[in-house]
Amino acid sequence: MVFFCIPCLLLIVYFAVAGIFFPKYRIFLREGWLCFVDKLRGRVCSVSFDNRMRIALSAWLTRRGMVRMGRFLHDERNFNITLTVFAIVSTVVSIYLFIVFVQFLYSPPCTADTCSI
């Protein structure tokens, strides 16, 4: 069941990027990887990384005044579905932007004497 691995994988990518700029998030990268490997093998996450992140996110949203959103994401099923949809949408947008970038490099809109923009 790869579906259950997608939220952990998305959190790993997030903390990998955040760990570049903020060293305090690098510890979450290791925990996220261990959780991802456990779920990929069909086991229960040994470090409960996804539960910690789910509770931390819902608490952060509640402190910011978004109580209904915090309650919604506090449910584990809603949290997993939301992160999975976000991962799929992010992947589609990234692929589209990559295709547009390659098309721009292959045939740029401006030449030496004319510009069609």
Image (cartoon, rainbow, N blue to C red):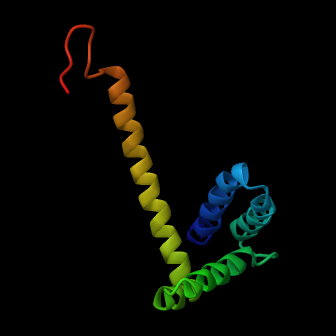
Q: Whole-percent x and y of residue 47?
A: 81, 75
Q: Whole-percent x and y of residue 99?
A: 37, 37
Residue occupying the far top of the picture: 113
* Residue at x 18% of width, y 23% of height: 116
Quarter holding residue 110: top left
Q: Nearer the viewer, residue 5 or 97?
A: 97
How many marks overall? 0
Q: Is residue 103 above or below residue 40?
A: above
Seen in the image, is 99 located left or right of residue 58?
left
* Quadrant holding the N terminus: bottom right
* Residue at x 38% of width, y 33% of height: 101
Q: Whole-percent x and y of residue 33?
A: 75, 61
Q: Whole-percent x and y of residue 114?
A: 19, 13
* Residue at x 50% of width, y 68% of height: 84
* Quadrant holding the C terminus: top left
Seen in the image, is 116 located left or right of residue 33?
left
